[in-house]
Structures are given as structure tokens and as C-alpha cells.
Amino acid sequence: MAAPCPHILALILAAGKGTRMRSAQPKVMLDLGGAPLLAHVLAAAGAVADAVRVIHGPDMPSVVALAEAAGASLACQHNQRGTGDAVRAALPLPEGTERVLVLSGDVPLLEAPALEAFLAAVPVDAVGVMTTTLADPTGFGRMLRDDAGAVVGIIEEKDATEAERALREINAGVYCFPAGPLPRWLNALTADNAQGEFYLTDLIALARADGVACLAQHEADAESLRGANTRAQLADLEATLQHRRRAALMAAGVTLRAPETVMIRGTLKAGQDCIIDAGCVFEGIVILGENVKVGAHCVIKNAELQDGAQVAPLTHIEGAVVGPEAQLGPFARLREGTVLGRGTRIGNFVETKKATLGDYSKANHLAYLGDATLGERVNVGAGTITCNYDGIGKHPTVLGNDVFVGSNSTLVAPLTVGDGAFLGAGSTITKDVDAETLAVGRGRQRSIAGWQSPKARAQQIKDED
């Protein structure tokens, strides 16, 4: 990441309610790729500017909280009367500011390298506008140029003539201004237009009147400049973002069996020769080592899977660390606090929570391990559960190395089982077990001769009647 440009303040316009989204949330807080729209813009702005200020509307606590968490300062636009009014709400500028970069909080795909190129192309004492060309420019302001190609203004679509609406070069809503004259220009704005708003675009004419150069920087990647005013447009942004993320993974040596079905809602870092099958969802921060294989329709959130781990289909992993060469699933569920050692095996319909398994331990099917610590080479038979909750608090189960737990066992915590102990199948274990001993906790089997089932007894009574 390049160092921030000196003395640049980034202003992010985030006061719009986004009524067409039909949401109780501010538009900029709607999710894109696992984070609010505003979070993407904050990340890009923070990478290129010395300071960031978010202009929000009244009663937007979620926007305020996100901005503060990112280290941004705040300004409230109490009455939404256009983009010029929004930037004016950010005054006064911090002392020492030389340039002001203006971004939109609902344009999340514009990344730091493009912003760096934009700032580098515009002299410090000039006004810069980022533009692009669209086959269908409907809804955007059009760039106005003179016969020599110089920028002379920007006309909003509602105020444009038919000839101006035919122009295809559009204003992308990204600007940089010299900080010195900016407050004066902002205070000179009027609302004499079709919408009765203070347009930031009118600063072009004011700057030219002061003899300040106005330059347009064309951005070839028009997709990165798209915003979202409707749920359909938000879905289009999601598709573009997911395509970018998948492409980056494949370029790094990851195989995606069906790329269009893989969803990355956060950050996914994957080593070489990983294979990800169809329908997988990654959320939060996920790290895959090398040669990790993830089967179809898995959901993995805030987890690390180390080299050679293999995940069978329909497995859910959250908040877990999976050791090298571990084998998981199918239909397994690893919950928060699970830590698996090398070569461990968690099979079908096994659930773990705050469980640590040492190297080569295994629970192959139909088990629950909660608040449990297992040593190395432990075998947990089918149907085994740890009874960790007594209705008030959670209690630990500790199994030493080489413990064998027979099928259908119930381990009532708090409980400690020593190294090499053997727990007989069908046992309910309520007391600690010493090392190298056999523990059996079950009722003695009896066979009762002459017993009749209820059905047989009913038939006998009927026959006697």
C-alpha cells in the first residue's frame, strides 16, 4: 500500500437515506461482500489520505459508529439539500489541509490504486473530476467541454438539454479540490436548478471564474464507479465484487470448481493448490494453507485451515483452527473455540464447541464435544456426548492421550480421564478415571424369561374373552 498523499482530507458523502432501497438502515450500511458499503469506501480513502471525514445525516448511529471505528471524523448534514450542501457541512477544514478528495459512500468498488492515479494526475492547485464513458449514461451528470476539449462544466441530467443528454462521458462523483478557495466556492453556491439543491458540480464554473484549471481524469474501469440506489443495483455490485475476488484467488493458484457459485463475504486467503468445490460460502476472515480441499456447499467463517486439511461436503466451520492434514465431515459442525491438531478426524454429524483435539484424535460420527480437551490419539465412539452444562454453568471434560471412548457413552463434566483409559460402550461416566484403567458405568443386563410384549398380552386377553 502506498503512503498517504500529504495533507489530503477525504470527505465521504454518506447522509443519503436511500429510500429506494426500502430499508430501515441508511443505504451506506447495507451489506456488500460481508461489510457495509461505507466500509469499502473508508478503506480506500484511508489508504490514500491523511485524514477522513464522513458526512452523515441526523439519526444515523450506525454510520457514526462505523466511521469512528475507522478513525474518521464526523460532520452532520442536517438538511439534505444536495452534494454541495453536504461538502459545506464538513467545514471548517482541518488545519494544514491542502487538498480535499470527495467520495460517495455508496460507490464501494473504487479502490486505492485508482484514487492514487487520480490524485497524481491532477495538480495540487487544480480541480479534478473523475469521469468515465457509458453506453447508457442515464441518471448521471454529463461532462461539458469546449471545442478544445477543456472541461467547462457538468450538467445534471434533470437540467440538461436533449443534446447534452446525448453525451456519454459522465461525472463519476469523485473530485479533488484545492483546500484554500474551496470554502469560498461552497458558500457561493446557489440552488437555482430543477431540484432546488446545491450542486457540488457547480464548483467547476466557480473555479474557472477564478482562473483555476479544471481537469477530467478518465477511468477506464467503469464498473468500479457504479453506485447503488436500488436492491437490483446492489446485487449488480455484489456480482462484480465476487467476480474480482474469485479472479484474484484463481490467479494465486486456487482451483474453483464452479467459480460463479463461490461466495466470499469477507477476506479469504488461500495457498497454492487449494481446491474449492461448488456452492461454498466464506465469511469473515478465513485462511487456507496449501493443498486444502473444501467440498461442495460448505460454510466457513472466521477460521484457519492449515496445509493439507480436507473438508467433505456440507460442513460448517466457525471460529475454529484446523490442523494440518485434518479430515472433516461430511455434515460436521465446528463451532467457536475448536482447535484441531494434525491428522485429526471429525466425521459426519459431529459437533464441537470450545474443544481441543490433539494430534490424530478422532470422532468419526454422531458425537458432541463441548468444553472438552482431548490429548493425542483419542478415539471417540459414535453416539458419545460431553454433558458440559448443568443448567447454570459450563464444565470441562479432559481426556488424556490414547483414551478410548466406547460408543454411546455419556461423559458428565467436570470430568478427567487419564492416559490410556478405556471407557466401555454405553457407559455414563460421572467420576474421574485413572490412567490405564477400564471404566464401565451402565446397568447390569438381565434376560427375563416368559416376558410378553403389550401387543401379545392384549391378544391373549382378547382370546380369553
Image (spheres, grey):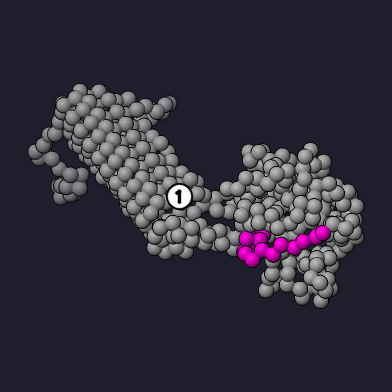
Residue 432 or residue 86, whichever sits in front: 86
**Residue type pointed to by label 1:** Lys
78 vs 318, left or right, is right
Quadrant of the image occupied by residue 361:
top left
Residue at 42% x, 64% y: name it.
258
Residue 36 screen position, x and y as percent = 61, 49
Residue 420 or residue 360, whichever sits in front: 360
267 vs 257, left or right, is right
Residue at 66% x, 38% y: name it.
71
Residue at 58% x, 54% y: name it.
32
Q: Is residue 80 visible?
A: no
Q: Residues within 10 Å of mark 1 (few under 14, many from 20)?
A: some
Residue 2 or residue 58, whichever sits in front: 2
Q: Is residue 255 visible?
A: yes
Q: Residue tagged by mark 1?
A: 269
At mark 1, the secondary structure is strand
Residue at 72% x, 45% y: name it.
8
Q: Which residues are magenta?
A: 213-228
Residue 125 screen position, x and y as percent = 80, 52
Quadrant of the image occupied by residue 216:
bottom right
Residue 369 screen position, x and y as percent = 33, 37
Magenta region includes residue 206? no
